Image (cartoon, grey):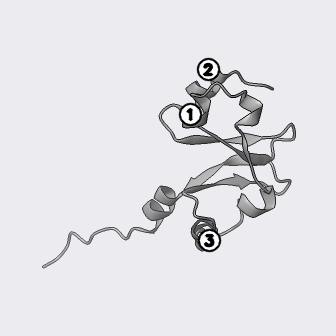
Amino acid sequence: MEYSREDILKIIHGRYSVWVVDENKRPIGWIDRVSLLSQTPTAEIIVRVDPAEIRIASSDTLREALSRMLGLGFKSLPVVDDTGSYLGEITLSDIEAATIEPENNNDA
């Protein structure tokens, strides 16, 4: 399914970028908000990357996701299933939220 520039802006909804998937729902890159505001054709503003380099499997650990993000300098990565199909994304904020230890309010 092909999306219009307006559709993509609605999908981004305040975010910096969105992942782009191919016809098999496999991540192939991203489009960012700034590029969408230009007059460049949508197909030309996709930042294409090697899917194997940027994706995280749903079975990977938070440590693996964080390591990949830091190595690539990304703040988020697409999460895929066993077939490589896009499931969603994981962000640095997600990892931070999952690893914060709750404060102990029972201090004496």
Identify the residue shown where x is 64% and y is 72%: 64
Q: Which of 36 and 18 is in front in this view?
A: 36
Q: Residue 6 has which mark?
A: 2
Neighbourhood count class around disc 2 (C-alpha, 10 Å): few under 14, some 14–19, many 20 upward: few
Q: Which of marks 1 and 3 is nearer the N terminus?
A: 1
Q: Earlier in the sequence, mark 2 or mark 3?
A: 2
Q: Residue 28 has which mark?
A: none
21 with respect to 62 (left or right): right
7 with respect to 96 (left or right): right
Q: Earlier in the sequence, mark 1 or mark 2?
A: 2
* In the depicted structure, whether residue 5 falls above or below residue 108: above
Q: Which of 48 and 90 is in front in this view?
A: 48
At mark 3, the secondary structure is helix
Residue 57: give x, y in percent of width and height: 73, 61
Name the amino acid, label 1.
Ile
Name the residue carrying label 3.
Answer: 71
Name the amino acid, label 3.
Gly
At mark 2, the secondary structure is helix
Whole-angstrom CA distance, mark 2 to mark 3, is 33 Å
Q: Nearer the viewer, residue 70 or 1?
A: 70
- Farthest-out residue, left: 108
- Farthest-out residue, front: 39
Q: In which quarter of the image is residue 55?
A: bottom right
Residue 84: give x, y in percent of width and height: 82, 53
Q: Are marks 1 and 2 in contact (CB under 8 Å)?
A: no
Identify the residue shown where x is 86% and y is 53%: 83
Of tags 1 and 3, the one toward the viewer is 3
Identify the residue shown where x is 62% and y is 71%: 71
Q: In which quarter of the image is residue 30?
A: top right
Name the residue carrying label 1.
Answer: 12
Q: In which quarter of the image is the C terminus?
A: bottom left
